Image (tube, grey):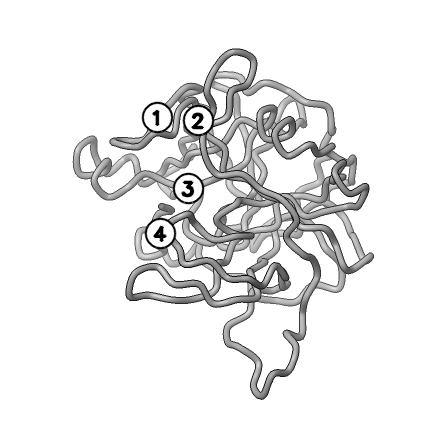
Amino acid sequence: MLLTPSAVSPEIMFTDTARYPYLIGGIQIGLCGVVKDGDNEGFPTGTLGMIVLNKNTGNRAILSNHHVLYGKPSYVPTADPRVSQPAPTSVPPDGQPYPNVCARATNGYFGTYQYDGKPYHIDAAVADLTRDDVGRYTRQSSSRISNKFMVPELRVARLGARVWKVGAETGLTYGIVARLEADALGADKPNRMVIMSENDNPFAVQGDSGSVIVDEEERRVVGLLTGGFSEEEIRKSGEHLRRGAFACHIEPVIQKLNIELLQLPVG
């Protein structure tokens, strides 16, 4: 589960619920359907990671998390595969259509996947676009505009590398790859990377799920943000874990979903 917004300094929180005229990485998306998790219900919400080619259908598609585009396995699922930008906040009245549909969830995977002889946890999905207005790769954050250029070739994450992400909740943040083969406490989620913020603020919070992780030096996507440390892990190991986040390695994600990264400018 992602860290809660209450764990973040107010000055870095700026939930972006704007509707963008073009689809770019780092903006808010959500499923057009209420799902239930125990006594709670709501719309799964997260971040558009990037635009990819869905080789299963031949269409351009949104890459994000499975728990964003489909809901977590513990949720009572929705039969509605439509994705909205921004995320919906209520069901339209009197059977009216959702107003901001941009894609339809087509395939995804949540679980352990064998890649190159090792088990990897994957929480990833794609949604084929129903809008053609694809723009530049990332939006600007609250305080700066990224002028980088993302290179689409695959790259294995490097221990100690400086990385960045753009999320719908916290915008552009930087961190360091602290671990490459981490597992969650009491959970079967092997071989994820851990990223620790390079300052005292969290690298990511709830709502940033689905952001792609980019190697600062090599300008290549190396991971897909999935969540933060649980409260149990924080109690056991210390408050410093609030600065950290988990991410799937990108290579197993690409192979399992049968997608291709597209080269789009950043800025």
First of labels 3, 1 by sequence position:
1
Q: Which element carries disc 4, helix, strand or loop?
A: loop
Give the residue number, with chain letter if any, for mark 3.
227
Cα distance, mark 2 to mark 4?
Answer: 23 Å
Please identify, in this view, whether the residue under mark 3 or under mark 4 is nearer the observer: 3
Proximity of marks 3 and 4: CB atoms separated by less than 8 Å: no
Q: Which mark is residue 153?
A: none
In the displayed structure, 114 sits above or below 207; it is above
Indicate the position of residue 238 as horizontal and vertical percent values. Answer: 21, 34
Q: Nearer the viewer, residue 115 or 1?
A: 115
Q: Residue at (68%, 22%) from the top-left corner?
A: 154
Cα distance, mark 2 to mark 3?
Answer: 11 Å
Cα distance, mark 4 to mark 1?
Answer: 24 Å
Q: Nearer the viewer, residue 76 or 51?
A: 76
Q: Which mark is residue 183?
A: 1
Neighbourhood count class around disc 1 (C-alpha, 10 Å): few under 14, some 14–19, many 20 upward: some
Q: Which element carries disc 3, helix, strand or loop?
A: strand
The amino acid type found where label 4 is placed reads Val
First of labels 1, 2 by sequence position:
1
Q: Residue at (41%, 59%) from the top-left corner?
A: 76
Check the image and name the residue furthest to the bottom.
Answer: 94
Residue 34 falls left or right of residue 189: right
The amino acid type found where label 3 is placed reads Gly
Neighbourhood count class around disc 3 (C-alpha, 10 Å): few under 14, some 14–19, many 20 upward: many
